[in-house]
Amino acid sequence: MTSLSQQLERSLQRTLPSATLTAQTLPELTNLSLYLLNPDYPRTPMSSDAMQAIWQEPAYWIFCWASGLAMAKWLRQHPDYVRGKRVLDFGSGSGVVAIAAKQAGAAEVVACDIDPLALLSCQANAELNNVTLSYSADFYQLNEQFDVLLAADVLYDLSNRHFLDEFLQRAKQVLVADSRVKNFQHPHYRKLAEQAATTWPDLDEFDEFRVVRFYGSC
């Protein structure tokens, strides 16, 4: 483990003492690995104190969520979407989408997340995959225009829906991936595709959350 991943693991263990981070190759993405929660982490009931700590500081970055995995695979299949372009990855989490965009040939990728540990996770995972990313903790401090904005797994919270309009002001093209919203409707987005994907490590989610839908700006 690198010093960054060790720092992340120590932070995680303040909430989940027996948890560890391990470098894991993602399904169908043989050249992309992430530091994620150990797959054999025991699925036993947690104490109320542990649950409260998790809700206060959710470590989303310890999983590669289905929408992020699906978008990374989509970029592998459609590298021209980002090749040679300036890309913003909104709500980066583990950094899987940002890393996939850089591997697909993007000229620059900015990983943006309000969680400082998520940005640290992006850095550790970028090092693990030998790619260089830029980082931002504040979407509203990024005043420059991007060629492409990518956003995976951000629509689950209704309070995030306003970003859809703001994305259109920041980039020429916007691609959104989501597995939680079935009836997505927005006048400036259209459905492009569907793809099966599973959160990794597998959370045994319902089948309905294993179908990721892609929406592009129009």
Image (cartoon, rainbow, N blue to C red):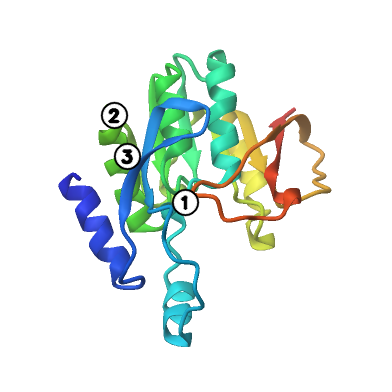
Crowd around label 2: few <14 · some 14–19 · many ≥20 (10 Å): some
Name the residue type under label 2: Thr
Crowd around label 3: few <14 · some 14–19 · many ≥20 (10 Å): many
Side of 179 relative to 26 (left or right): right
**Position in image of residue 66 (x %, y %):** 59, 44
Q: Which comes sooner in the sequence, label 2 or label 1?
A: 1
**Position in image of residue 209 (x %, y %):** 70, 50
Give SS at disc 1.
loop
Q: Residue at x 44, y 14 (%)?
A: 84
Name the residue type under label 1: Phe
Side of 63 relative to 24 (left or right): right
- Name the residue nearer the viewer: 39 or 31: 39
**Position in image of residue 181 (x %, y %):** 75, 51
- Name the residue nearer the viewer: 175 or 74: 74
Q: Tell me if residue 69 comes above or below residue 53 in the rendering.
A: above
Q: Tell me if residue 159 comes above or below residue 81 in the rendering.
A: below
- Marks 1 and 3, how far apart at CA: 12 Å
The residue indicated by pointer 1 is: 63
Give SS at disc 2.
loop
Q: Which comes sooner in the sequence, label 3 or label 2?
A: 3
Name the residue type under label 3: Asn
- Marks 2 and 1, how far apart at CA: 21 Å
Residue 146 visible, this angle: yes
Q: Tell me if residue 172 comes above or below residue 34 in the rendering.
A: above
Quadrant where the N terminus is found in the figure: top left
Quadrant for residue 71, please give it: top right
Q: Residue at x 41, y 48 (%)?
A: 141
The residue indicated by pointer 2 is: 132
Q: Residue at x 32, y 53 (%)?
A: 21
